[in-house]
Amino acid sequence: MSADEPVLMQGNEAMARGLVEHGCVVAASYPGTPASEILSAVDAWRKQEGVAMHVEWAVNEKVAFEIAYAASQTGLRAATAMKQVGLNVASDPLMSAAYLGTIGGFVIISADDPGPHSSQTEQDSRLMAMQAKLPILDPASPAEARELVGCAFALSEAFELPVMLRPTTRVCHACQDITPAPVNTLERKADFHKDPQRWAATPKFRYELHRALNHKLSQIAAYAPTAPRCLNPTTQSSRAVVASGVAAAHALELITTMGLQEEFVFYQVVQPYPLHSDFMAEIRSSYDDVLILEETAAVIEMQLCDYRTVRGRLSGDLPDAGELLPEIIERILYRFIGQPVPEPVGTTAAGGRRPTLCPGCPHRASFYAIKKAAPRGLYPSDIGCYTLGSNLGAVDTVLCMGAAIGQAAGFYQAYRVTGQQRDIVATIGDSTFFHAGIPPLIDAVVQGARFVLVILDNSTTAMTGNQPTPAHGTPDGTAVDIASIVTGCGVSFCKNGDPLELPAFTDLMREALAFSRDHGIAVVIAQSPCLVDKSVRHARRPQAQITPAACTGCRHCTTQFECPALVYDETSNKVTVDSMLCSGCGVCRTVCPVQAIGQKEQP
Amino acid sequence: MTSQQLIISGVGGQGILFITRLLAETAIAKGLPVLTSETHGMAQRGGIVISHLKIGDFASPLIRPGQADGLIALSTSNVALHRSFLRTDGWIAANSAQPLCLAEPPQVITIDADQIARNMDNPQAVNLIVLGKALASSRLFCTVDEMMAVISRHLSGRPAQLAGALAAVTAA
Ligand code: SF4
Ligand code: SF4
């Protein structure tokens, strides 16, 4: 690549580029939308630039954090990337690392998902930064996200603190023309200086560290490179609009297209916490009316805390949930300058197809077998593609990573202690099991819980783009076997089955249920590869074919099995196969109660 | 400067990201600035997937309702869902077995891309077939030839895929 030509970079690729350009040596992550592409892009840039790095998909975000943090303790530059709910998992080391500080620059990328588009919550990582007392930067675009990575490393090394970077979905999954800069390998060697008073500080010293942290924060509130930027400095007005993150990009474009340049002074805040003290003083003294545009919490608004002049989420001028789309900001701006708000130009119609498991996805067969074997069961489930088992009525709960197992045990105990018994079948994906499923399984064994746990092992992290799991091993490491973990946790019933062999798999489910009712936990490992995993070769299989004369139009296959390739046709009262979608898994043949589904001769 | 705002939508699995990126790369090859917004995550499993593509001098990655110049719809149902993004003089290029009769403008061009893809024995090619139709209408910021050059670079190591892609984009 010639250095001065722009290339199309996704926000996640741009941040990854920034990490590699600024001499990051260790990067660790756990995948989660919208942050998933960051680590794979780091690895791609590393290969392309031929730099020495340790890049790893860690077992979960807490471990990823600790791997990268230790590298920073040795003086190397390091980074960890995750989605916002992943930072919940890593919050324990986060809070403590703020007190202990760092040596080499340490950047924590926590990607938020206002909307939410693909998350359990709309939580704001900037609040997490406030809670941890760490500086956080809030980019408005992919190009700015890359620039702020460099800024974050410099800030981190200037104050020996971890620095957070908070992109949102609209930055992570935006693409932009960006010109790569040369890579600056810093040629540092890992060199850990023992200092137990600091690195293993006791509570007494933590008090001192807390005070030192407060002092650093007051200095960071005067750090020039991350100060708010005034984007129309020649404007004179008693009104100001302050925006951060992608809301600043939306506002900037609206101000230009609506011709509002002279209506108010417009500031972009790149470091929402700690807010710069001079800026706060300026806002309080120079303006009578201030509007804050930020997602999703009132982080800037709370710090300004002059409610006579400052409006935003707390004052009700911004909606209290959901994404700040440009059309919403447009209306807020009109209201702010006291102009009539134009009629909305028609909103996006609701409806359309709901997401569903891929045609031929092995999870669908597993769920079907579970419903068959335990029709009145309780079905706690977990985070992944298989959350879509809710379409089949085979997912009753989704709380957070690993909770299927904790909740299965909790349901068992709640029924047992009130003198009842229910069939309980928990489902969890292979990657999620590694991530957070092992401690609750140990707990369930120790407490004598009784349920069936189906580990949906498609040997990949499918939802986020097919990242590897620990069962794959790495070139330098050893693969970790799921069944050994299960038996190592003390589970005596642990059997494998292929859900695409539906009748045999349903029998296995029945056997597991019978065991669980009398003895304890039964684990079934449902092994069949994800269909979209490009690292696995998928043979072309003959597609399904309906015998119209035999099809009674009962719709069992479309409602109970819910393969999107099976389409019910009202006029003929028959089901047909969509040849654009059918993957030829063959499972529907055993699902049809009257054997109306066969297969084509040719693949 | 050339300026164009496009919505590209369909259902997960149809390759909306791929054609969004091809268009974005074609813009860059022409020296134009570009901003896109993509859909990832759960929706990619057969749900509604939408890309915003803005070519020219823009700051926000999203298109407001009523501002898009064109809508490329890889599935017929997306026309109703996303036509509100269009300007009153906007156009639609849609994958549809039947011609679409919409009550008022926009101008609509349709192509039965599913059938063409089936005939080509390449169900994955629907995205490129509809893109080719839109290109052939001369309403896009780039030409078929400029797009073919980008596709050729993109798939240079994979001759079979490249031949399939070029056939699809010129099928209309
Ligand atoms: S991506 Fe894989 S795991 Fe996810 S629904 Fe499709 S086949 Fe199933
Ligand atoms: S064979 Fe049946 S179940 Fe499998 S993808 Fe085709 S229609 Fe769906």
Image (tube, rainbow, N blue to C red):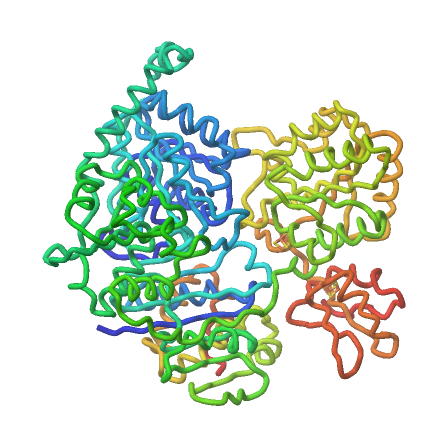
Q: Is residue A138 among the parts visible in the rendering?
A: yes
Query: Which residue lies at the image location 73% right of the left edge and 57% below the top edge?
Result: A392
Left or right: B105 with respect to A567?
A: left
Q: Nearer the viewer, residue B7 or A92?
A: A92
Q: Position of residue B37 (x, y in %)?
A: 40, 61
Q: Is residue B34 above or below residue A310?
A: below
Instruction: Name the quadrant of the C terminus of chain A.
Output: bottom right
Q: Nearer the viewer, residue A200 or A71?
A: A200
Q: Position of residue A140 (x, y in %)?
A: 31, 52
Q: Position of residue A73 (x, y in %)?
A: 36, 21
Query: Which residue lies at the image location 68% right of the left edge and 63% below the top edge?
Result: A583
Q: Is residue B31 among the parts visible in the rendering?
A: no
Q: Is residue A532 above or below residue B29?
A: above
Left or right: A267 with respect to A575?
A: left
Left or right: A96 with respect to A418?
A: left
Query: Which residue lies at the image location 26% right of the left edge and 30% below the top edge?
Result: A186
Q: Is residue A315 above or below residue A50?
A: below
**View extreme (front): residue:** A308
| Quadrant location, ligand no. 2 | bottom right
Q: Is residue A172 above or below residue B44?
A: above
Query: Which residue lies at the image location 33% right of the left edge and 45% below the top edge?
Result: A17
Q: Nearer the viewer, residue A293 or A178?
A: A293
Q: In which image quadrant can residue A263 be found?
A: bottom left
Q: In which image quadrant can residue B45 be found?
A: bottom right
Q: In which image quadrant can residue A487 be found?
A: top right
Q: Position of residue A180 (x, y in %)?
A: 27, 49
- Total labels: the figure holds 0
